[in-house]
Image (cartoon, rainbow, N blue to C red):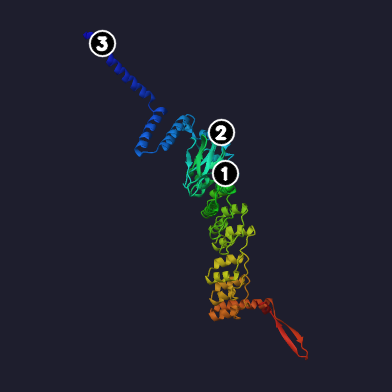
Amino acid sequence: MREMIFVMIYVSFDMVLGAYLIGNMTALIVKGSKTEKFRDKMTDLIKYLNRNRLGRDIRNQIKGHLRLQYESSYTEASVLQDIPISIRAKISQTLYMPYIEKVPLFKGCSAEFINQIVIRLHEEFFLPGEVIMEQGNVVDQLYFVCHGVLEVVGTGEDGSEETVSLLQPNSSFGEISLVCNIPLPYTIRVCELCRLLRLDKQSFSNILEIYFYDGRKILNNILEGKESSLRDKQLESDLAFHIGKQEAELALRVNSAAYHGDLYELKGFARAGAGLNRTDYDGRSPLHLAASRGYEDITRFLIQEGVDINIKDKFGNTPLLEAIKNGHDHVASLLVEEKAELSLDDAGSFLCSVVSHGDSDLLKRILSNGIDPNSKDYDHRTPLHVAASEGLHMMAKLLIEAGASVFSKDRWGKTPLDEGRMSGNKNLIKLLEDAKSAHLSEFPPHSQEITGERGCSVVVVLSCLCLEN
């Protein structure tokens, strides 16, 4: 009897110990498996749903989506995480490129841009009835349809729903809200089991910063399809505003590269299709900035790209004038070789201002580039008038050597010599008188006799004074 009791106890203990060991061994073997992770996630999810007392419909949607993720996990891209990025990129190109190339949103975009989109895509699955995007929300994902059908639903003010269109394979949605940072105009709901490709906003924005020309193409494609994708004119206006804003930002970026002498970045902008003639808020082009900063290499590159070398900013300055004003003779010579012009709107006032400031170096550079030293301002004063009135001997000498006339008269009939005598500068007066004598010796006066009706004679003295303005 004792032996039977002992055997029973021994066998029971052995069974319990064996079950314990087998259970632990099984747990160790399956620990970290997808099934266990799914079970743990589902348990946590049920606790969360119970704690927040969510309704039956949303419970079923959440559980169904989680179950779909588990069932499709054996084919999703997460299994490729340990593979090198270069190989993953090739796999993505093989799997997703045929779909993305046919998306109307990317019509006319470069192959490099589309390739960057493809290698950043993530694959997702959705069950029928799931709402992927809801009207009024600002989304941060862009989706492309590989398989399945989705419906675009518009919700009225009274809460009524209307199916606007159906999204078939090779369609996209979320681009309006993503690109323009405006609320989503429609709700996107799944009709059939869908396989979608998702692109994050940050990745999309990073790509557009490099391929900004393709970004403009995308905006144009959205506008072209506005009959089917936009409900009212307000959205079209938002898109137009965004295009203008993007172009202004692009002009600033191109000008910034030119201002800082970054030829490599500027070439990158040119390769990507950026317009090198675009101007900023002051009407300054990249050539204006390169010339003003003295960047000969950038100036040469811009000329080779065919930019307008005589473009004016809002202040009437051309690139050649910017180079001359800032003392960059090599850049100025380069522009002159390409037939660049100063094109001063008011040469007289500009020269008078230069003389008044006593900037002899700038005056030399201006005169050497073909500006008429006898140009007049609003008071008919020439630069020599200003130099004489202010007693600027050096400036007057430069002007006379450049061909300035001492006989020009201003609005009040005064010549530069008159102004010089009033200033009291003896050296300046002598300079002007010598210039006058040189003019008279070069063009000596002569007389011509004219006989009147009564037989009297009138002698008219002609000299270089007849050249007065």
Per the image, the residue denoted by label 3 is 7
CA separation in Å, label 1 and label 2? 20 Å
Q: Secondary structure at mark 3?
A: helix
| Percent position of residue 6, x then y | 23, 11
Q: Which mark is residue 105?
A: 1
Evaluate if marks 1 and 2 touch, with contact meaning CB atoms under 8 Å apart: no
**Residue type marked 1:** Leu
Would residue 271 be seen by someone viewing this image from the given angle? Answer: no
Evaluate if marks 1 and 3 touch, with contact meaning CB atoms under 8 Å apart: no
The quadrant of the rendering that contains the C terminus is bottom right
Q: Secondary structure at mark 1?
A: helix
CA separation in Å, label 2 and label 3? 67 Å
Of 210 and 372, nearer the camera is 210
CA separation in Å, label 1 and label 3? 79 Å
**Residue type marked 3:** Val
The furthest residue to the left: 2
Per the image, the residue denoted by label 2 is 94
